[in-house]
Amino acid sequence: MRNLCLLAAFISPLACAQVVSVETNSLMRLPNTASTLQLEKLVVADYGTLLIPSNVTELSVGELQLGHEARIAIVPSEQALDMKVIRAQLAEGSQITARGAPGTYEKAARAGRNLNLQFKALNAPKLVVDARGGTGAPGFVGLDGANGQEPGCTWGQAGHGFDGSNGSDGQPGAPG
């Protein structure tokens, strides 16, 4: 029976950690091995970035500290992210971003990720959450104009060239 419980603990889609710390001016990505993460303490130093992968659907944090201009960046996904924080201390300029991906000529823009944020105690000058959709793809370039007609004789006059075609409109952006 003990072996079965131990096996269930290893296979469970729940990851626990004591403290996760992101250093100043650095980027750290959370593991994408589990869909549910529980952190006792999460510290993102000044100008640091924590990246949350798309398969994480629930993040529970006991204590959250974001330094000056620190950010939590959330990768776009069809699944919503539930983020529950017991105590949060946010410095000036810190933010949580869940922006959508921009479109390209081959792919449409992706929508921003749906967030369910819950803070039990929040100490911050301002809470900034950016969940804009991705920008649309640019339009195609118009065609060049055609050459004019050659002159008929040595002193003749050349004909006018033809106008080029218009470029196309860009593709629509994605919802936030």
Image (tube, rainbow, N blue to C red):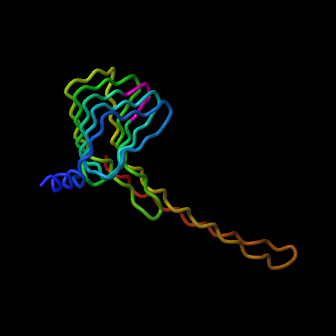
Q: Nearer the viewer, residue 16 or 154?
A: 16
Residue 124 at what x, y percent from top left? 31, 22
Judge whether residue 141 is colored magenta.
no
Which residue is depicted at the point 26% across and 50% down? 35
Q: Nearer the viewer, residue 152 or 146?
A: 146
Is 96 left or right of 163, judged from the image as shown? Answer: left
Is 11 left or right of 152, judged from the image as shown? Answer: left
Is 81 left or right of 5, judged from the image as shown? Answer: right
Toward which corner of the image does residue 22 lie, by quadrant?
top left
Residue 168 at what x, y percent from top left? 48, 62
Q: Nearer the viewer, residue 89 or 76?
A: 89
Residue 142 at what x, y percent from top left? 56, 64
Q: Quadrant of the N terminus?
A: bottom left
Q: Is residue 31 above or below residue 24?
A: below
Region rendered in magenta:
66-71
Which residue is depicted at the point 29% across and 49% down? 56
